[in-house]
Image (cartoon, grey):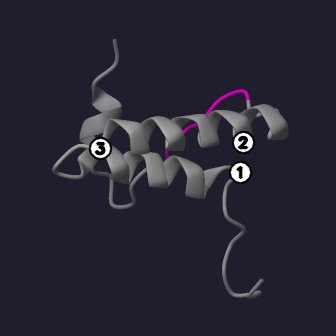
Amino acid sequence: MDQGQPPQPVCAQEALNLLNCVTESPFDQDKCLRLLHSLRDCVQSKKVKKFSLAEQKGGEADPISKKHD
């Protein structure tokens, strides 16, 4: 690992792959389902309890974080 880069968050690549899959057109449900299972396996093996997004710099609110159900 390069010392100049911060460590990658746990299961980050699996989460990113799934997010990118759902944005693809045409939507490939089977592919996304496989990626979902991959992410699930990762969080179970690493005992991840919760994900969070880093706050944006510059004081701007993240539109995604504003929308809470």
Give the labeled residue for mark 3: 28
Q: Which mark is residue 42?
A: 2
Q: Are marks 1 and 2 in contact (CB under 8 Å)?
A: yes
Q: Residue at x 58, y 58 (%)?
A: 13
Q: Which residues are magenta?
A: 49-54
Give the mark toward the camera: 3 or 2.
3
Check the image and name the residue furthest to the front.
Answer: 30
Check the image and name the residue furthest to the top.
Answer: 69
Give the labeled residue for mark 1: 10
Is 50 part of what is drawn in magenta?
yes
**Residue 42 spot, x, y in % from top left:** 72, 42
**Residue 25 spot, x, y in % from top left:** 16, 51
- Report the magenta stretch's main SS: loop
- Of the residues shown, which amino acid type is indicated by label 2? Cys
Q: Residue at x 67, y 55 (%)?
A: 9
Dividing the image into 4 quarters, which one contains the C terminus? top left
Specify which label sits upstream in the sequence, 3 or 2.
3
Specify which label sits upstream in the sequence, 3 or 1.
1
Give the mark toward the camera: 1 or 2.
2
Q: Position of 19 compared to 61: left or right?
A: right
Q: Is residue 61 visible?
A: no
> Disc 3 and disc 1: Cα gap in Å?
25 Å
Q: Are marks 3 and 2 in contact (CB under 8 Å)?
A: no
> Disc 1 and disc 2: Cα gap in Å?
8 Å
Q: Position of 22 compared to 38: left or right?
A: left
Q: Secondary structure at mark 2?
A: helix
- Of the residues shown, which amino acid type is indicated by label 1? Val
Give the mark toward the camera: 3 or 1.
3
For disc 1, the neighbor class at 10 Å (few under 14, some 14 to 19, many from 20) is some
- Of the residues shown, which amino acid type is indicated by label 3? Asp
Q: Residue at x 72, y 27 (%)?
A: 49
Q: Position of 12 compared to 28: left or right?
A: right
